[in-house]
Amino acid sequence: MSTITLVGNLVADPKERNAAGHKLASLRLATNERVKDTSGEWKDGDTTYVDITCWRKLAEGVMSLKKGQRVIVVGKLKGRSFVRSDGTNGYAYEIEASDVGSSLMSKGQPKESILPDLENPW
């Protein structure tokens, strides 16, 4: 399994339940890259939605997060197969989180805006 880090916005408030006698929280994250259009303006690229699973203490901690909040998720990329209602097979990916935290970057801020100003070190 691969470790992956994602940054994005929560699509909904976390949902908590018990599974196999342990707390489980489910999150859905929307993430997209920032791209410059032909006029040089920053805009959102295509959006990817990812399901996140948090267990035990992490599940308790993420319950304070709210819809729209920008978060950083670190975890294992897992795949699973399923059968759709029409009988065809499908495959989905999800992240089993090992850590989740609030991002200090505002939504949509281009990377250049966080680089240091080397002309003015003060």
Image (cartoon, rainbow, N blue to C red):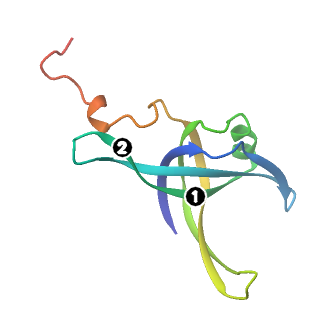
Q: Residue at x 84, y 52 (%)?
A: 17
Q: Residues within 10 Å of mark 2 (few under 14, many from 20)?
A: some
What mark, if any, has residue 50 been given in the picture?
1
**Which amino acid type is marked by label 1?**
Val
Measure how far apart labels 1 and 2 are at the Cα level.
21 Å
In percent of the image, x 59 and y 43: which residue is there?
A: 100
Choose between 9 and 122: the one closer to the eye. Answer: 9
Toward the viewer: 86 or 21? Answer: 86
In the picture, the quarter occupied by the C terminus is top left
Of residues 120 and 19, which is closer to you in this image? 120
Would you place residue 11 above or below residue 109 in this image? below
Residue 109, x across and y down, in percent: 38, 34
Residue at the far front in the pictured view: 39
In front: mark 1 or mark 2?
A: 2
Could you say which disc has been placed on residue 118 in the image? none
- Say which residue label 2 marks: 43
Q: Residue furthest left?
A: 119
Under mark 2, the amino acid is: Lys
When asked about the image quadrant of residue 102, the answer is: top right
Task: Tell me if 10 is positioned left or right of 40 in this view.
Answer: right
Toward the viewer: 20 or 102? Answer: 102
Q: Residue at x 61, y 38 (%)?
A: 68
Residue placed at 85% from the left, 62% from the top? 20
Helix, strand, or loop for circle 1? strand
Q: Regarding mark 2 in the picture, which secondary structure is present there?
A: strand
Quadrant of the rendered image containing residue 83: bottom right
